[in-house]
Image (cartoon, helix red, strand yellow):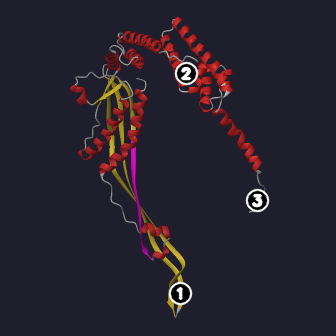
Amino acid sequence: MEQLFTIPKHFIISKILPFGLLVLLSACSSGKQSFQKGDYDRAVYQAVNRLQKDPGNKKAVSTLQQAYKFAQEDHQTRIEEAMKSSETFRWETVVQEYENLNNLIVDVRQCPACRSITGTNTKYPEQLSAAKQKAADVRYNLGLTLLKENNRQSAKEAYQHFEKVKQFVPDYKNTRQKQDEAYQAALLKVVVEPVEVNKGIYQLSNEYFQNKIYEYLEHYEQKSFIKFYTPQEAGSKTLVPDHVLTLTFDDFAVGQTYLKEKEQNVARDSVKTGTVEGKEVYGTVKAKYITYEKTITSSGLLDFRVMDWKSKNIITQEKMPGTFVWRDEWATYKGDERALSKEQLKRAKRRESAVPNPQFLFVEFTKPIYNQLTSKISNFYRRY
């Protein structure tokens, strides 16, 4: 094909270079722009990065001298303002500011050319430790106060406060014990009744379905204040549940079989049928083509309900249907196979497949029910 036009090389280069220069300039920034915008921490990091690669860069030296001083002043000002305020979590602001200051100092220390520019680079370990202690004091006392309110929502909030305490001071007093108390007080206890199947032939399949549910519930409770128990577990712990979750098959039918048969006459012209006196004879060949389609339908309806144990009221209820259709297709013919198309002949060579066992069909129709069930549990217990 004839080429209509050629893109000049200088045009391509002129378009690529500006983008490349932007990336290069960004990586090699002296921090001056960040400094002019008042982002002194970023200006320090950029200047340090530049001086690590080019120790004699004058712009980076000038930026670091000014930005480092201003950054320290800003953090110290915010620390003083926070300490004078009456805001409940003011010590957490102090912690954050001291951590930011220390990060700046660590960054400068890792750059030999920067040390002489910034002067003394002393970290604030004692001040940071004292601020963390005070921040932990506040969270711990709030947790204790909420825990005394003896309600689930307050216990959840207390748990989060104790979690914060551990972040500031890992071994603070008896925080771990109190956090465990808060967790137990916040826990919603749900007994999950097993799915009952009266027909013994499906017991193994039902156990598979039940085990899948328990696996999901075990995973779900790891990231929530919900704990699910089997009736046996609840009995062994003499547990008083908050909810009872019941799963019942209202109805199910496995293995409803339907066979569809279709017969058609097929023919093909201009097919060699023999030889007469040395000459090929062509004619029409015919066949009777019969197709079969067998479907086995299995379906069921699961009743999901959650009952409040104390009031015995049904909190939520939903019917969840599931259907699985197993399908098999094959064909036979009578007559001349040359009358068949390639696709027809291919199907005619297939044989009827063995029918799957009832246990397999049971598992298959419960799969869409399982998806509905887990979605319902997730959406319902999200509010708790």
Dot placed on the residue nearer the N-terminal end, 2 or 3: 3
| Image: magenta residue range | 321-335
Q: Residue 45 location, x and y as percent?
A: 59, 25
Helix, strand or loop at label 1? It is strand
Q: Quadrant of the N terminus?
A: bottom right
Q: Which quadrant of the structure image shows residue 259?
A: bottom left
Q: Position of residue 329 (x, y in %)?
A: 41, 61
Helix, strand or loop under label 2 = helix
Instruction: In the rendered structure, find residue 281 and report the number of the disc placed on it.
Output: 1
Q: Which residue is mark 3?
A: 3
Residue 110 located left or right of residue 34: left
| CA separation in Å, label 2 and label 1 | 98 Å
**Residue occupying the point 55% across, 21% down:** 104
Please tell me whether residue 217 is drawn above or below residue 62 in the rendered image. below
Tell me if residue 39 can be seen: no
Q: Secondary structure at mark 3?
A: loop
Vertical placement of residue 93 versus 20, above or below: above
Q: Position of residue 29 (x, y in %)?
A: 65, 30
Between the residue at mark 1 and the residue at mark 3, the CA separation in whole angstroms equals: 56 Å
Residue type for callout 2:
Leu
Percent of width and height locating residue 237: 23, 24
Tell me the mark number nearer the camera, choosing from 2 and 3. 2
> Within the magenta stretch, is there residue 45?
no
Q: Nearer the viewer, residue 145 or 254?
A: 145
Q: Dot 2: few (<14), some (14–19), or many (≥20) neighbours within 10 Å? A: many
Q: Residue pushed farthest left?
A: 236
Residue that numbered label 2 is attached to = 104
Count neighbours of disc 1 (C-alpha within 10 A) and say few if under 14, some if 14 to 19, many if 20 or more: few
